[in-house]
Each structure stands twice: as structure tokens, then as C-alpha cells.
Image (cartoon, grey):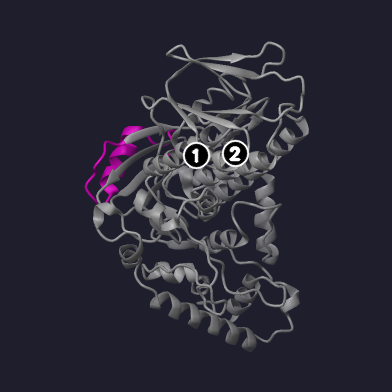
Amino acid sequence: MSHSSDQHAPIRKIVIVGGGTAGWMAAASLSRFAQGRSLDITLIESTSIGTVGVGEATIPSIVHFNHSVGLDELEFIRATRASFKLGIQFENWRTPGDKFFHPFADYGIDFSGVEFQHYFYRLRKNNPAADLHDYSIGTQLAKHNNFAQPQENPNNPLADFSYAYHFDAALYAKVLRELSIARGVAHIDQKIEKVNLRESDGFIESVLLDNGQVVAGDLFIDCTGFKGLLIEETLNTGYEDWQKWLLCDGAVAVQSLNTGEPTPYTRVTALDAGWMWQIPLQHRTGNGYVFCSRFLDRKKAEETLLQRISGQPITTPKPFAFKAGRRTKVWNKNCYALGLASGFIEPLESTSISLIQTGITHLLTFFPDTSFDPTMIAEVNRRHQHEMERIRDFIVLHYKLTQRTDTEFWRYCQAMEIPASLAHKIDLFKSSGHILQHEPEAFEKSSWLSIYNGFGIVPARTDNRIDHFSDENIATQLAKIKQTLDQAGRGAVSHAEFIRRHCVAPDFD
């Protein structure tokens, strides 16, 4: 770390350690931030080490991130062989044979300052067959395997809804690498031999590479994955274990040939000791089994996965081991952890890449000078803790609400104690239909509603502010919404046709 007589001198040198999705997202965003500033950015990675690289499904915040770093959406989709993601289809989670959809789009319309679900549950009292899925444009598009981009006409039901992507993580890192290097990011392909600390305060001063080169910096970004070379192995920051709530500690992944047109959604299927993902790209499908090693060994998990994939495998199954939890500090001294180095929550709701994005946002919001103000560092660590805990609660919700009792794994999940923060949210919804959020959260209220509804949780009462509306009036208004969304969902082009028209990858021209 460079010395300055001025303790508040600007940061001049950023060193990103580790490539992959996290490293190159950081490089792309920081290189955009650096424009017009005297700021050098170096990324060090060893291509011989490799990356995890299975984070191929995302949530809607990725759309904003790509725009913020200057990626054209359709060019990005072609380059990463991406498909669109309207949400996630859950299969066998509530009970074997059951399925429900978690769309990224909102449900219905809020009336008179009261959220839509209260009107829906009033309707359902008189019409038990009423289906919440009828009131989401995302679900209606997905039901027909259709897709449309949001329209500018505010009177169109397609005017405002969210979506995300499925993409090849290695190709995404390549796109961001090319973008970053074109903006002046220095790229070094070497292993790190040693991390050097400053004697006076234990800050990271430099890293020694295996070719003898020493790279010094003011701010170090740790993107070295689970091992946390800087944040943990060097600074001994600490890790908070969440495995008592999130039992799964392993995964095996394999890619397969497509057997049909890619769906505009991810499929996640509950299995005996965890769940399976299926992520459709333009050129292949990503598959994986996330499991708990207490109830299933890796060999059996691999056999189960290979039996259940629909297309011919094109890679060898790749295993991963992990521990759900978070780093006790994401920012320690002059080291900032991103991606798997900052913690890990299983990819059930595709949050890994969004956590990288928000980590970058927090860093840019509280970008330091060489004094490394402890108050700013503390606020970033508080925000990271808040975000991780709220995502943790959302994932635990999927396991806790299950009605499955067919295996030991699911019986444990149903009976387990859960965080008090989550228990309060569930109790509030069951009692009153209100959905609680603390500050901004990764998942909007509509996402919580999707999961409550999917697992059959119905509130005991609705908001008393709608008591003066007649049942007939509510039924009429909701019927109009349902009809409009149904027509819009049916009328859009197929997902595959949209890709063919606008953003098919060059390999498929």
C-alpha cells in the first residue's frame, strides 16, 4: 500500500485478485468509475486455477448492471448465448407432484394504497379456485413459453415488468474482460506466491507473484472464491456458519444438449436430499444437484443427476463443496471481498451474481481514500450483513414451508428452528396478509407472495381498508386484470422466436 503524508489522499491503485464472474464484474464497473480519475486497476488471476463458473441464472438487477457498465443488451445475449428468464418454476417442493411459479413481475395492481394480495384473498374467500398466477404477466408469458420486452405504453400490460437472463458464465466473464482491458485495466495471468502486509497496521501492502513480480496497491479486491486468499487466509476475518438452517453443503453440475427450445424460466425440482436445477441457454442446458451430504453421498447425487437430465451430457459431472454462511466482514482494513469470498448462499434463487453487483455498488457508494474511514467501512459491513441475512431468510422459507415428510431431509427442514427475523415475517403474513421488508431487500414483496402462495399459506384476514369494497366490485376489477394479462401472455411471440429475430448467437445463425 502506498504511503502519503496526506492521510486522506485519493486511492491511486486498485488490485483485483481473482478473475471469473466476480473479478471481471468488479473490473468492468471500476473501470467505468475510473474514467476521468487518476486510478490504475490491475486484475491478477491464474487461468490454471479455474473458477466455479456455474452461476448461470440471475435475478433482474443484472439488467441494470449490464447497462451501467455499457453493455448493449442484445449484443450481450448473443455473446453469452443467453436466454431470457421470467422467473423460476418450482416442482415437488410443497408436495411430490406439485408445482408453482415464482415470476419476477408484480401481481395485479395496488388500489387505494392497499397492496394487491389483499384484494386477491378477498376474492378467494368466495372463489377458492382463484389462482394468483392469473395476475402476473411474467407467469402468463412463461405459461406459453413466450417472451416480450417491456413496452413504453403505460396502458399496455407489458409496460413494466422485470426479467433476468440465463447465460454462459465463462462467456460473460470473457465479455467483461474484453471490455475492461479496452478501458485500461491491466491483466496479469500469474499465481500469487505470497501476500505482504504492512507492519505498522496489518494492511495489505502488495502481493508477490510466482514469477517474482511484486504488485503493490492501495485497495485490494478479493475475488478468490471460497478460499478467500486475502480476506480470510491472510486477514483471518472469520466466517458465520448458517448450515443449521441451510443444510445443503455440496453440489454436482453437468451440462447437456438441449432437447427442445429453451424455456424462458429456470426449473428447480425438489429431490430426496436437496434439489436439481435446469438452466436453458441457447446452445445447451446447465444442470445440477444441490444436496446435503448428511443424507446423500456425492456418488449417489451424481448418479441421480445423470438419470434425470433430459439431454445427452456434454461435460463430465463437476463436484463442489461449500458451507452456507457469510464472512463476518466483507471489508477488512484495505481488503474488500466480492463473490464467493464474501460468503455463500445456495443458488436456489440465483442470488450469487446479484450479491457481487450490490457489493460493487456499496464500494462505489462509500469509495474510500487512503484513510479508510472506519465509519464508512462499518456501514458497508452492516449493509452486507443485512442483505445476506434477508436473502438467507428467503431461501430458508422454501425449506421451512414444505409439507414433504417422505425423506429424513425434508422432515428435518419442516421441523427445524428458523431465524427469529423470518419467523416474524411468516407470522405477520399468516395473520394479516401483510408482507414485511426491512430497508431495500434483494427480493421484492411480490417474490415473498409467490412463495407463500406456492406453499399454500393463506392469511387469516385482509387489510381492513378494503372492507368497504363490495365482493362484486373486487371480482369485476380482478376479472379485467386477468383477461388483459391472459391476452398479453398469449399474444406475445415465443421465447425461441424472439431470440431468433433479435439476438441469436452467431453459432446458430
Q: Which part of the image, by quadrant, shows the N terminus?
A: top right
Residue drawn 70% across the image and 33% down it: 368
Q: Is residue 186 magenta?
A: no
State which tag comes first along the sequence, 1 or 2: 2
Residue 258 visible: no
Horizontally, is 279 left or right of 187 in the view?
left
Q: Which part of the image, by quadrant, shows the C terminus?
A: bottom left
Q: Which residue is mark 2?
A: 34
Horizontally, is 165 left or right of 344 in the view?
left
Position of 280 relative to 476 (above/below): above
Which residue type does callout 2 highlight?
Ala
Which of the 4 image quarters holds residue 425? bottom right
Which of the 4 image quarters holds residue 127? bottom right
Q: Secondary structure at mark 1?
A: loop
Which residue type does callout 1 highlight?
Arg
Q: How many marks?
A: 2
Q: Secondary structure at mark 2?
A: helix
Near-viewer residue (440 or 462): 440
Q: Mark 1 to mark 2: distance in Å?
A: 9 Å
Q: Position of residue 261 (x, y in %)?
A: 28, 61
Q: Position of residue 40 (x, y in %)?
A: 57, 30
Q: Position of residue 434 (x, y in %)?
A: 69, 64
Q: Which residue is mark 1?
A: 183
Residue 71 visible: yes
Q: Is residue 300 magenta?
A: yes
Marker disc for residue 201: none
| Magenta extent | 291-317
Near-viewer residue (247 or 498): 498
Callout 1: few (<14), some (14-19), or many (20+) C-alpha neighbours within 10 Å? some
| Mark 1–mark 2 CB contact (< 8 Å) | yes
